[in-house]
Image (cartoon, rainbow, N blue to C red):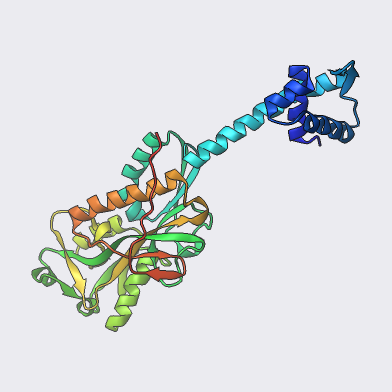
Amino acid sequence: MPDVSRLRVLRAVVAKGSIREAAAALGYTPSAVSQQLAALQRETGLRLVDRVGRGIEPTTAGRTLAEESEALFRELSRLDGLARDLRAGRTGVLSIGYFASAGAAWLPSVVTVLRREFPELRLDLRWTEVLDERPADLDVEVFVETRGARPAGTIVYPLVDDPYEVVVRDDDPLAEGSSVPLAELADRPWIDNDITHGACRRVLLAACAEAGFVPRFAVEMHDNRTAIPFVVSGIGITVLPRLARGELPEGLTSRPVVAPVPVRRISVAVRKAVADHLAAARTVELLRAAVSQECGSHGVEGSARSTTTGAWSEAPLPLRSSRST
């Protein structure tokens, strides 16, 4: 395969009609240009130039090779521009993983801004609720931290600590208090609202184990919003994260669960390979803004932790970026 840099020299010689002028255009010495031409002739097995007096004249093979390489250099120029755009976050693909309640609460506003600021960027949004089936190649992932569940090869930034609440009917005695000790729910029928192997369910079951019981599920659902109507019917109670609760229908109320307080810690992981990508950095900024707005309306406490996978630190590590224009 012909060397690209030597082909570039041949094209310059054919265009300028002189080794000296080609050398001046390329920033080479005339000797270096002659050496590159000689190497290309050996490489291709073709005579590419003939000496005419003190100058040179491209052969038919030399002119043909120079002309036919034009498409190659056009494509190389396009790839060079693509690389610049990728560095600036103006094109390419950004994959974002999310779980249901975070996706519903935060991603619409985040995606709206990303599409406006990075119009050529294709967004690949992936649902990652099942721990054992999470893709390993996500660029950005909003996830619930559980032991051993932080994605490898990433920088992790905290978003929010989201406590759990119990949803009950207004006429339930539990609605009379300002909070509900978790142990008081031990004998109640529960409406399940999560997938079996989800991180959020693991957080809740660990808290129940600490309180000394295993929930008795009367109905097993796999979605927060569809579990709530079953509470209206009086079949049982449901316990879910505050962010996932949303607006409750008339006749229902929620109370914080305490002793212990189940809390799911929500963070965003950025793959180290794309940490400098402007769109990835902007995604983290937008998520933080969406979390701040959502938490202000829901009263959820923010977190001040930041980690690199495998290590913890007390101070947050800001992900700085400049916006694309």
Q: Is residue 212 left or right of residue 151?
A: left
Examine the rendering and report whether any part of residue 197 can be seen: yes
Residue sitting at 56 percent across and 35 percent down? Answer: 82
Location of residue 325 by image quarter:
top left
The vertical placement of 11 against 285, above or below, is: above
Examine the rendering and report whether any part of residue 193 can be seen: no
Give coordinates of residue 99: x percent, y percent: 38, 56
Residue sitting at 32 percent across and 66 percent down? Answer: 264
Give coordinates of residue 251: x percent, y percent: 13, 58
Residue sitting at 60 percent across and 34 percent down? Answer: 80
Location of residue 172 by image quarter:
bottom left
Taking the view exactly as shown, the residue that stands out farthest to the left is: 176
Q: Is residue 255 left or right of residue 312?
A: left
The vertical placement of 166 against 63, above or below, is: below
**Can you say which quadrant of the picture contains the N terminus?**
top right
Q: Is residue 114 left or right of residue 261?
A: right
Location of residue 7 by image quarter:
top right
Residue sitting at 79 percent across and 23 percent down? Answer: 19
Q: Nearer the viewer, residue 186 or 67?
A: 67
Q: Say how many tags the image has.
A: 0
Give coordinates of residue 309: x percent, y percent: 46, 66
Give coordinates of residue 219: x percent, y percent: 31, 66
Q: Nearer the viewer, residue 177 or 107?
A: 107
Q: Is residue 266 left or right of residue 91?
A: left
The vertical placement of 194 against 96, above or below, is: below
